[in-house]
Image (cartoon, coloured by chain):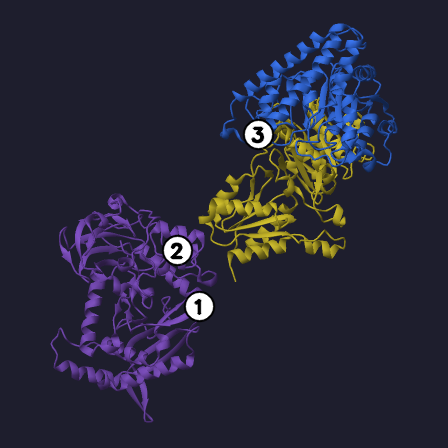
Chain colours: A blue, B purple, C yellow
Amino acid sequence: MSGDKLHLDHQHLLRLLAQMVRIRVFERRCAELYQREKIRGFLHLYDGEEAIAVGVMATLAPQDAVIATYREHGQAIARGVPMNRLMAELYGKVEGCCRGRGGSMHFFDRALRFIGGNAIVGGGLPLAVGTALGDTMQGRDAVSACFFGEGAVDEGEFHESLNLAALWRLPVLFVCENNLYSMGTALAHAESVTDIHAKAASYGVASEAVDGNDVIAVELAARRAVAALRAGGGPQFLECRTYRTRAHSMFDAQLYRDKAEVEAWKQRSPILRFQSWLENSHLAFDDEVARLEADAEAEVTAAIEFAEAGHLEALEDLERFVVMDEVPA
Amino acid sequence: MPSLGPDMESARVVEWLVKPGDAVRRGDVIVVVETDKGAIEIEVFEDAVVEALVAPLDTELAVGAVLARLRTKGESEHQASPDTPKAQALPVAPAPAFRPEPPSVSTARLDAGAPRGATDSGHQRASPAARKRAADLGLDLATLHGSGPGGAVLLADLAGLGGVSRGRRAGGFDAAAMRRVIGTAMARAKREIPHYYLGQQISMAAALDWLGRANENRSVEARLLPAALLLRAVGLALTKAPSLNGYYEDGAFRAGEGIHVGWAVALRGGGLVAPAIHDVDKLNIDALMSALRDVVARARRGGLRRSEMVDATVTVTSLGERGADTVQPIIHPPQVAMIGFGRIVERPWAVAGQVQVQPVIGVSLAADHRVSDGHLGSQFLSEIERLLNAPESL
Amino acid sequence: MTTMTYREACKQAIRAALQADPRVFMMGEDIAAYGGCYAVSKGLCAEFGAERIRDTPLSESAFVGAGIGAAMAGMRPIVEIMTVNFSLLALDQIMNNAATIPHMSGGQFAVPLVIRMATGAGRQLAAQHSHSLEGWYAHIPGLRILAPATVEDARHMLAPALADPNPVLLFEHVMLYNVEGDVDEHLEGVDITHARIRRPGNDVTVITYGGSLPRALAAAETLASDGISAEVIDLRVLRPLDMGTVAASVARTHRCVIVDEGWKSGSLAAEVCARLVESVFYELDAPIARVCAAEVPMPYAAHLEQAALPNAERIVAAVRQVVRPA
């Protein structure tokens, strides 16, 4: 579905909805499995932000690189990493996308150039500058899409990376998922200037703020940005304004925000809004939406069965991949 | 294979004096082993019944190797043989698991003042390398004197104790190995012991005169030699100079429990041993002469007992008729003194303002300054002179 | 054989790498227009162009991270960090990304990256430009840590480092840049797995690396006239440690002195010491001694700085104490 133009055809629209629903259903089951202790470690859910991953990913080509954060289930699913491998990873099984070494915060998939869940806030930005540099030096027509939250803006790496990418005019799509809270700290408590896309613009980076809960708006903006990147326009910046409607992680009392605020954002859930719009526009029908949900449930159920049936990495392979024997082809 | 001295690492069984089933009593000699220093009889320290003779004849066995299994009273047959008889083929067996059994292996020389069983190697400071080397050689660390900090045994202290399986002469002791052993001990002495030396010329006129008279009534075999007088004089003089008789270990002097004089015996093939003559101060002149003859003969033909190898609390060397006039001895560590006698020669000697020709002997003392001073040493030599001038008191 | 300085050897190594492989490029602060803080890259920009000799902003984290990303995208970057103290600004990228991504991704990604940096004291650069922190990096699984101490290693370690599929950190000691030595230009790299015995000896093993090697060799010379035969081992590779060579030597000499310009507490010297105790405890005939930097931030004044550093005299004294304890 990559390309310069957005095709508002029925199939594409349903595909966008399906991707968001797959993410939502996958994570709902993750929360349950976490509480049943099938999944451990930190588990950060993307509930409410699905439009961003789905909208941006719809504009990327296979040769592009994706660098994400520790809240990256949505990006991985939207990029096309099979749910089986993701769920097996959450189960810590050898069939997982990182053979059980990464867990929720570190999904990788080499075939899809999905270069990680990075769990150091801001730590992925320099990497994206580097993949863009490497691709450019080798004459590849590839962009590097880098997802990060607004908390990364606090970090020096954000500023270093934007500056370097702009200085070297590298094809990096910086996607800021501004969900208003870095963990429990509200944006206004952390930043003197809260207009994030203006900060990016100060480095000479083409910058735009969009409604991150509107999948069409995100895709449109991303499509423009990617086209500019491929045309050699230097790095592009999207500030996607959104809201995390679940807690930061599974162990979060949410003392830092009002329930009313959360409820209000739930009403603006990207899935709810897009689904309503499709139905009101007669672009989708009840039974189609119901089938998407059923399909997603079935897919997740199969993934759980796959994970349950998976195997544990042999202990003698504990130190495998610490030192690589060769660069994977 | 018992450790008969700090310098011993292995030996060969040359003769069994018991057979399986024999009852043996504490003190019985049950086996003769050939060491670097000659053949030595091995005694047992418990009443027991011989269960099995394990060590083959004429095979070099490391210290710690099993020689025989004995069953003591109250032991079942099963209990008595916990060790696998691995000594069957142990040319120079590394015996890392070996723990010396106090009664049969502890070296009395250093344990003289310690309760039996206290020879746990763990109490002896040693570098890890020395510890391992000692274990490989089957040496009990407690029998070793360390030159390292705090008396720790270092590798250098074990130098020369290796490689006996090479260069051994068939059927006899290895002169080169003995030379290494002597070298190691003497180098250690020179390195560690702050020697002081005193010398004195003593007229032997009275002593020889007395000896001539004493021998008139004795058979040829029982005749006394000057050596017996010298030994007796040393023994008695030592009773008044206890700080010359004993050991310097772990930074402190420990007096000998008796006066056991090591008598240096030159071996015909080269080298020397200094077997102990026990309780010299308590033996009369005839018993002393007899002991001297016995120990010299056994030293030369082989057949010293382990206690004789390790018990000396002080050493005497007498160069004899063909020796030099004087000797400056090197103390045998961990002893603290050594007395040397030159040959007896006729010299002009002033007596009451008149020069006479008299038989004269040079006596010298090397003593450890960490334990005694020249003043005491001088008194000791004067006492020897007094005794030799009053031979009837001997 | 060609005689050249360590600095020239570093430069020739980079030149050869740039000529040999179009994927190789270098980036860092002031490496192009300025010619490198220690003039290692002087002239290379004119020869290879600003694409392959890239000046970066003062953004250690960004350009080290970019090196990692570029390596994962198929390049073979050489990243220069001016001095080891600055590398702390990029520690997140080195530790959390370069060293962990291969394992964290289950072996899907390798990071074939080389990071060069100056290390060590002796030039009166005080407490933010003079430390020896390579021991910290040697703590991190997934990294290979090299410390070229000779002109030959400076010339020939880079090629195998670039061929390594793992991130390699090269520590160049500031006091070595002017040292001259012989180099065989035709060597195809040297091994980057083994320590080397730089001077054979029997009585004691002196283990060192990098800038302390010349001091250890000078100490060995002094000791020889004193009748003490010191074997000097250059670790060369600080991770993974070649304990085989080291332990075999100590097992032979039974004594060991470790010389490390890092601070003693939690140091590489501590690691080597611990491993020797683990592997050759029963060969030790004396306690292992260490000669390390004084535990102070490196002072400016020359006499204070010198007092804080290992030198030949201190090595000699430590060896004497080990060989002939007072």
**Label 3 is found on which chain of the structure?**
A
Quickly name the residue at label 2. B158
> Dot 1: what SS?
loop
> Dot 3: what SS?
loop
> Dot 2: what SS?
helix
Q: Which residue is drawn at 75% across and 11% down?
A: A2
Q: What residue type is labelled 1?
A: Gly
Q: Do labels 3 and 2 share a chain?
A: no
Is the residue B348 above or below the residue A5 in the image? below
Please tell me the numbered disc located at residue B340.
Answer: none
Residue A296, visible in the rendered structure: yes
Q: Indicate which label's residue lies in the foreground, 1 or 3.
A: 3
Locate residue C95: give its quadrant. top right
Q: Which residue is drawn at 32% across and 83% down?
A: B383
> In the picture provided, is A32 more to the left or to the right than B59?
right
Instruction: Looking at the image, tell me whether mark 2 or mark 1 is earlier in sequence order.
Output: 2
Q: Which amino acid does label 3 sit on?
A: Glu
* Observer-nearest of A162 and B122: A162
Residue C59, visible in the rendered structure: no
> In the picture provided, is B386 more to the left or to the right than A293?
left
Q: Position of residue A1 (x, y in %)?
A: 74, 10
Quickly name the residue at label 1. B251
> How far is disc 1 from disc 3 in space, using C-alphas?
65 Å
Q: Which residue is drawn at 72% across and 10% down?
A: A15
* Observer-nearest of B355 and A95: A95
